[in-house]
Image: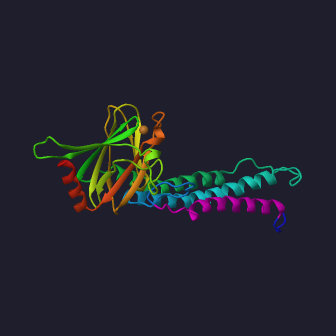
Amino acid sequence: MNTKLSFGSKVTFCISLAVLSIFFLGNVFQTVALADAAEPWQLGFQDPATPIMEGIIEFHNNLMFFITLIAIFTTWVLGRCLYMYNSTVQKESELFTHSTPLEIVWTIVPALILLVIAVPSFALLYSMDEMIDPGLTLKVIGHQWYWSYEYSDFTSFDESNALNFDSYMLPLEDLSVGPLRLLEVDNRVILPIDTHIRVIVSAADVLHSWAVPSFGIKVDACPGRMNHASMFIKREGVFYGQCSEICGVNHGFMPIVVRAVTLEQYIAWVGKKISE
Ligand SMILES: [Cu+2]
């Protein structure tokens, strides 16, 4: 084989470059969401608001490194094979059929890559399951087709007034300029920042899923079963999510809106709510 760059090498090089650029496009041209909500043609993640979501994005970026390397390498190998195993290029067949050193290499290397990936993956997985001494509990119940929320920690002094409410999507005719279509609700969930929060999720009728991308939270709401998750919101803001389990005709119309406020504002809100 001559050392000059052959036509096949150029083709495989171009294909590798194309694959590489596709992988990079997804990361470089990340769209910046105006609110903490999904936006049309969004390619990247929404800005994280919890340490868990930060971890998820970090892990995603780590994986992208390996994925890019593997994609380029396998595309190159495939391209070379397609080109070289061709009677016009190679008249005479090579005689070897096995290569023990090569087989050892292509077993060990992927195993090592998996090992390198597994360590941060498990660390993240277990940290997501961790329940760190929650300061308050939010109970989320999915209904066809709205969410209801209970703040089980709070009742009025005579226990006649509990803090719970339903949260419906704002219909189109009630929307003014500003609120997001199909994402805004009549009653937002109010939660404090810098507090360990336990979220308990269940459903009253069919499967739903309570998901807020900026929090890195997606918990299935199963009838007759309590699922839980913990979160720690790091910044104030309004965070949008949607039901993420096909649950019937209005599945797309049961959004989630969480407003994260300071602890003082939160306490004031709770006081106002239970005295209503
Ligand atoms: Cu649902």
Q: Quadrant of residue 262?
A: bottom left
Whole-percent x, y for residue 28 in the image: 58, 65
Q: Residue at x 36, y 47 (%)?
A: 186
Q: Which sits in the foreground, 166 or 99? A: 166
What is the span of residues highlighted in magenta in the rendered image? Answer: 6-34
Can I make out residue 50 in this image?
A: no
Can I make out residue 44 in this image?
A: yes
Q: Residue at x 75, y 54 (%)?
A: 79
Measured along the vertical axis of the image, is residue 53 above or below residue 254?
Answer: below
Q: Which sits in the foreground, 3 or 10? A: 10
Q: How is the image coloured?
A: rainbow
Q: Quadrant of ligand 1?
A: top left
Residue 203 magenta: no
Q: Is 156 situated left or right of 33 in this image?
A: left
Q: Quadrant of residue 19?
A: bottom right
Q: Is 169 situated left or right of 84 in this image?
A: left
Q: Which sits in the foreground, 90 or 141? A: 141
Name the dominant secondary structure of the magenta segment.
helix
Residue 24 magenta: yes
Q: Residue at x 25, y 48 (%)?
A: 137
Q: Residue furthest left?
A: 158
Measured along the vertical axis of the image, is residue 48 above or below residue 169?
Answer: below
Q: Is 2 situated left or right of 62 in this image?
A: right
Identify the image quadrant of the N terminus.
bottom right
Whole-percent x, y for residue 202 in the image: 33, 38
The image shows a total of numbered marks equal to 0
Whole-percent x, y for residue 271 in the image: 18, 53
Whole-percent x, y for residue 167 in the image: 35, 44
Q: Quadrant of residue 150?
A: top left
Measured along the vertical axis of the image, is residue 184 above or below residue 61?
Answer: above
